[in-house]
Image (cartoon, rainbow, N blue to C red):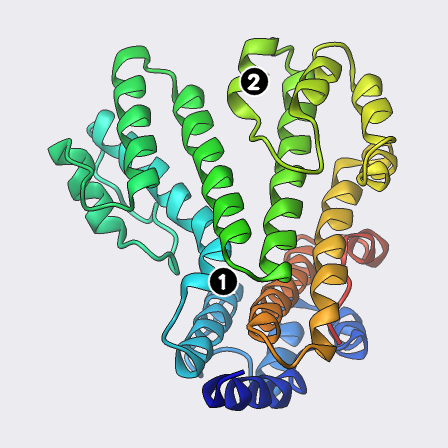
Amino acid sequence: MTEEYIYAVARVRSRELNLLSRQDVDQLMACRTLEECLRTLSDKGWGDGNSSTPEEVLAAEEEKTWAFIHELTKDMTPFQVLLFPTDYNNLKAAVKAVVTSVEPHDVFLPGGSVDPEVMLRCVREGDFSSLPEHMAQAADSAYHTLLQTEDGQLCDIILDRACLCDLLECGRNSGSDILRDYAELTCAVSNIKVAVRACKTGKNRAFLESALAPCGTLDVSSLSAAACKSVEDIYGYLAATPYSGAAEKLKESYSAFEKWCDDKVMDLVKGQKTNPFTIGPLFAFVVARRNEISTVRIILSGKLNGLDDRMIRERLREMYV
């Protein structure tokens, strides 16, 4: 391990002490109003001092996380598996904005690895050579497909699948077990979500085969066949895979399934607490921060909309600490 990583992991260990614990989450849940929640978060150092709305507070915390990682390492390659979804969502927005001749306003997500303005220029000029190779191919295909068919969903399928394929390749080529396993879990979970939605909306086998991304822990052919029959067949197939727990949660509710997915990720990265010799602890810290931001978003949204505390608690994610 390099001296740089030794120092980086030491700093991460120190910063982990500031992560929200279950007690902190319970304290937020005890707040009676959204305003009280925001004051409690401010007392814990959340926001940038000028944040006045929930989204501003959460955005500030996301920015702090990446600023910290940039302080620790110049090599952001290991974090591409976290950045690809943002990049491809921005690419979707750029393609649709250009094809529909709509000026994009507040449609791009912050924090990706590719400047959305570069994406927009590439689409407008029909020249995608400034984008990473695999992204360029997918962008070209999605752009011309949308021009020819005016089918926004088909455009989304092309880019969503390309995102998963890039994510898987990045994880497998990283040489890191945690990045590989995270990418595999993310792809498998996305495939399950696609299969369930496709089944409930009556999509055919051709649609499923074009939408699902091959991964190591799911046989997409079997998943497609099950989705073409019924949701119960999907559950039956999943029962014989590492995702049997997903089937049980899907039977309960979709929100329970989404919580299960996020908790599986947290279980995966928690192992990095005792692994001081790789990029793993840095990666785990980013995932942990994203998880607590998501948890806080659920609480703030619940308080804003006057949801019963029981309903909010059912959606709360497992914490890293």
Q: Tell me if 170 is positioned left or right of 311 in this view.
A: left
In the image, which is nearer the foreground, mark 1 or mark 2? 2
Q: Quadrant of the C terminus?
A: bottom right
Task: Give coordinates of residue 152: x percent, y percent.
Answer: 39, 22
Q: Is residue 317 visible?
A: no
Q: Which residue corresponds to the image point at 62% horizontal and 36% vertical from the top-left?
A: 215
Q: Identity of the amino acid at label 2?
A: Glu
Q: Which residue corresponds to the image point at 64% horizontal and 63% vertical from the top-left?
A: 291
* Residue bearing the label numbered 2: 209
Residue 206: which disc? none
In the image, is residue 294 above or below residue 276? above
Q: Which residue corresponds to the image point at 66% horizontal and 52% vertical from the top-left?
A: 305
For numbered disc 1, what is the local secondary structure? helix
Could you tell which of marks 1 and 2 lies nearer the N-terminus? 1
* Residue bearing the label numbered 1: 55
The quarter holding residue 284 reads bottom right
Q: Identity of the amino acid at label 1?
A: Glu
The quarter holding residue 257 reads top right
Q: Is residue 117 visible?
A: yes
For the view shown, which residue lies furthest in the left direction? 125
Task: Give coordinates of residue 204: x percent, y percent.
Answer: 60, 8
In the image, is residue 14 above or below residue 260? below
Q: Which residue corresponds to the image point at 64% horizontal and 15% vertical from the top-left?
A: 201
Q: Tell me if 51 is positioned left or right of 97 in this view.
A: right
Q: Tell me if 205 is positioned left or right of 230 in this view.
A: left
In the image, is residue 196 above or below residue 183? above
**Of 273 and 109, the residue lying toward us:** 273
